[in-house]
Amino acid sequence: MKIATFNINGINRRLNNLLAWLHEAEPDVVCLQELKATDAQFPRAALEKAGYSAVWQGQSTWNGVAILARDAEPVLTRADLPGASDDGQARYIEAAVNGILIASLYAPNGNPQPGPKFDYKLAWLERLIVHAAELLSAGVPVVLAGDYNVVPEPHDIYPTRSYDNNALVQPQSREAYRRLLAQGWVDAIRQIHPAETVYTFWDYRRNRWQRNAGLRLDHLLLSPALAHRLSDAGVDREIRGHRDTSDHAPVWIDLKG
């Protein structure tokens, strides 16, 4: 079973790119972030023609998350992250697909920091940590996939000082990610590529793609009930080099059995 996460950065603008990648890579499940589309604007018909059913939580201009499943119907279990009933940002969706509970998440960027946006980011990550612990306690196979907007370690970003004040690399952001892993979640990319430099995002500015000046922001975390099935993981980085593409590349895992 192949599960991928892809911050699409505007699903309708990048629809042709998305459909071409789906045809080539043939993932069984895809978690999308930054749809930048309302529920009504979601391209359901085009995805169904490509063989994918979907559940989604849209939002105009920003945010928006979805889960696609090939030749299967994702069963929606949650359309938001618990812990703040007044949070109207579409950043979390959860569905069951072929016996696995899968979440597509888009954590807040948090910039500029310090300030209210960074406070919101940290509070959102705290809510994720609480909910993740509840999912683990259920003992079911779970994948938490998406754009975490956290660079976990210094070797997950190209050598630079330009991000020193960025919310993505702050000690509080990294500590939240470490506490999440400490619950027992397995970072799939690091499990398969423990020492390799792996990037998933290259900013459009300053020729960062051409210079391979990247960051690892997109992660798939596996619960212990699922981690033993992990057989491979990687990044389809060539997608980032296509015309009018997202600034992220798809990240994927293969599960045996």
Image: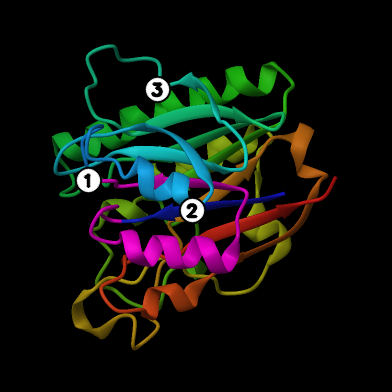
* Magenta segment boundaries in residue numbering: 9-35
The front one of 103 and 42 is 42
Residue position for label 2: 50
What amino acid is at disc 1?
Lys
The front one of 95 and 199 is 95
Mark 3 near mark 1, Cβ–Cβ under 8 Å?
Answer: no
What amino acid is at disc 2?
Ala
Q: Residue 213, how many percent across, how many down?
A: 36, 79
Q: Residue at x 60, y 40 (%)?
A: 181
Q: Estimate the spatial distance between the alpha carbons at disc 3 and disc 2, rounded to whole Å.
A: 24 Å
Q: Residue 145, how many percent across, how many down?
A: 52, 43
What amino acid is at disc 3?
Ala
Q: Residue 233, how many percent across, how many down?
A: 67, 61
Q: Earlier in the sequence, mark 2 or mark 1?
A: 1
Closer to the eye: label 2 or 1 = 2
Task: Find the residue positioned furthest to the bottom.
Answer: 210
Residue position for label 3: 79
Q: Considering only vertical position in the picture, is 215 above or below 63?
A: below
Residue position for label 1: 36
* Residue 31 falls inside the magenta stretch: yes
